Amino acid sequence: GALLARQPMQTSVASKPAVIADSLALFGTSSGRVLAHNYATAAGDLLPPPRDAGITRWEYQLRGAISAKPALIGSSGDVAGVVSQSGDVFFVDTLTGSGVGRAKIAGGAQAAPVADDAVMYIASLDQSVYAFQPSEALLRWRYRTAARLDRPIALHEGVLYVPVPGQGLTALDAATGDVIWISKDVSGSVIAVRNGELIAFEAGHAQVIDARRGDVLEDIDLAGFERLIPTAFVDAPIYALGASGAVARFEPR
């Protein structure tokens, strides 16, 4: 728990927490800048003086504030995707800072995009879900809804889980955008998988959901708890944070 270093930023960042790619911390800012803060060496050691305060490896200026956390595409994290509030979609090589692709959507994103090895998925305030391939920012598919999408989305084993207000939790085939099922009784976001079943949560209430059909298997009263934070997405302990300062830990069984 000892403080090893304190590194100033050149500008106030908006997308928290940072996305970490090797020795880089990727941020978005309220002014529309996306930047890579080099905080350590490739081996993870603090940079030697005078660079021990950190340096900006690269940065770009987008249109509109960036409040959603960037997403890393692929297991190696060589490409990052960023979405601004004005609808700029930007892909960048994290190591070189070279732009890979750029596109425009009608609205921005409040929820952080998610990604697999080849595609980034965006739940947009323009009532659509988008799937973009980084190269040339190629649009793979678009799924339109009747509501603004502002809640966290999740991706697991080729299925994208999107909470759609007024419609319910919607499971989409990540490859095609086709609807697999809609669970009208679920309004929360999927935060974890436990024993092959989905765990969805909104403040004070959790649900266990059949991943194949979307049926609600169990309702769990978590009154007073505002956040559930899994230590990993699949079969891992989950911390619950309460408004009063209470912290609880749920273990897999």
Image (cartoon, rainbow, N blue to C red):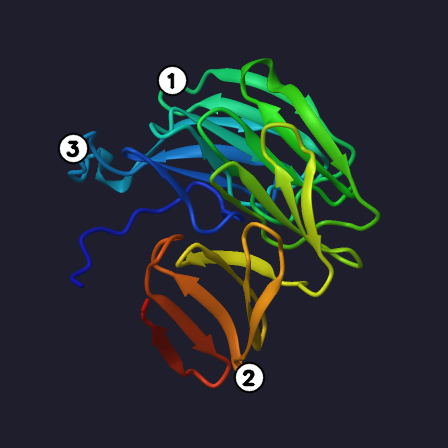
Instruction: Name the disc covering residue 223, or none.
Output: 2
Residue with the mark numbered 1: 96
Check disc 1: other Cα within 10 Å, few if <14, some if 14-19, many if 20+.
few
- Indicate the quadrant where residue 43 lies: top left
Tell me which residue sits at (54%, 21%) in the image.
Answer: 134
Instruction: Give SS at disc 2.
Output: loop
Mark 3: amino acid: Ala
Instruction: Give SS at disc 3.
Output: loop
Q: How far apart are marks 3 and 1 (CA)?
A: 17 Å
Check disc 2: other Cα within 10 Å, few if <14, some if 14-19, many if 20+.
few
N-terminal of the pair, mark 3 or mark 1, is 3
- Indicate the quadrant where residue 44 lies: top left
Tell me which residue sits at (18%, 40%) in the image.
Answer: 46
Tell me which residue sits at (21%, 39%) in the image.
Answer: 52
N-terminal of the pair, mark 2 or mark 1, is 1
Mark 2: amino acid: Ala
Residue 63 in sight from this viewpoint: no
